[in-house]
Image (tube, helix red, strand yellow):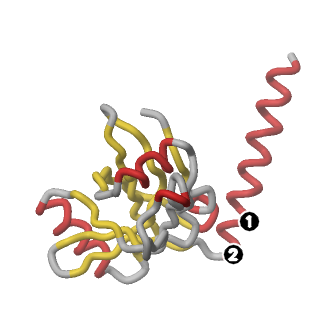
């Protein structure tokens, strides 16, 4: 399970409570681009329209610009491949106030590209400060332990 692209800002801005894995519908050159480490999940979200889930706002540039189809949109909505019960669960979560579906990372599993989705609550400013303080304290403790 190798991580191809990660949403670095997700754990800073969101408190992740639950995780889901989803397949994703991509073009061939998008797969090559992701396996090359190109792409970004910054500002992306997961939305449910009708009975289908979509990845919205993720940027996946073409693998080779010269060989890309005319009119290709790098930020197009991409369909997520989930079971019906998973979509119903996500729909229930999305309808709750304060809960959002956040894409966390693209990764490979059995030579397939998957998307990890987190159920999150947006952190307030004081929550972010507490997270930063805790991370710094943990870093200092590890530094002291490795010095001994």
Q: Provide residue 122's location: percent of width, then percent of height.
A: 53, 73
1 up-or-down from 37: above or below: above
Q: Quadrant of residue 12?
A: bottom right
Q: Nearer the viewer, residue 28 or 68?
A: 68
Q: Which residue does the numbered mark 2 point to in the structure image?
A: 125
Asked where in the image residue 17 lies, by quadrant, the reply is: bottom left
| In the depicted structure, whether residue 17 falls above or below residue 31 | below
Q: Nearer the viewer, residue 96 or 2?
A: 2
The residue sitting at 43% across, 43% down in the picture is 107
How many numbered circles are shown?
2
Looking at the image, which is closer to me, 27 or 132?
Answer: 27
Secondary structure found at label 2: helix
**What quarter of the picture does the C terminus occupy?**
top right
Task: Name, please, the residue furthest toward the top.
Answer: 148
Residue lying farthest to the front in this orientation: 66
Q: How far across and down, in percent of the image, does residue 114 sit?
A: 35, 48
Name the quadrant of the N terminus: top left
Give the class, few, some or many, for how many residues have Cα within 10 Å of label 2's Cα (few <14, many ≥20): few
What residue is shown at x 16% (from left), y 69% (from top)?
Answer: 88
- Residue 49 percent across, percent down from the top left: 24, 80
Decide if residue 99 is on the left or right side of residue 147: left
Element marked by disc 1: helix
Residue 3 against residue 26 in the figure, above or below = above
Q: Are marks 1 and 2 in contact (CB under 8 Å)?
A: yes
User: Does residue 15 appear left or right of residue 116 in this picture?
Assistant: right
**CA–CA distance between discs 1 and 2?**
6 Å
**Where does label 1 land, which residue?**
129
Q: Residues within 10 Å of mark 1 (few under 14, many from 20)?
A: few
Residue depicted at 44% across the width and 61% down the height: 103
Across and down, in percent, residue 56 comes to 41, 73
């Amino acid at each position: 399970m190798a991580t191809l692209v990660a949403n670095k800002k997700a754990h800073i801005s969101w408190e992740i409570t639950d995780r889901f894995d989803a397949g994703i519908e991509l073009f061939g050159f998008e797969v090559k681009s992701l396996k090359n480490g190109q792409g970004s999940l910054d500002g992306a979200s997961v939305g449910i329209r009708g009975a289908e889930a979509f990845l919205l706002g993720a940027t996946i540039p073409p693998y080779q610009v010269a060989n890309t189809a005319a009119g290709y949109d790098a930020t197009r909505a991409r369909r997520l491949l989930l079971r019906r019960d998973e979509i119903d669960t996500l729909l229930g979560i999305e309808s709750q106030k304060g809960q959002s579906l956040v894409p966390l990372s693209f990764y490979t599993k059995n030579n397939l590209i998957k998307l990890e989705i987190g159920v999150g609550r947006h952190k307030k400013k004081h929550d972010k400060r507490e997270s930063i303080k805790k991370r710094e304290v943990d870093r200092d403790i590890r530094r002291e332990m490795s010095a001994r």
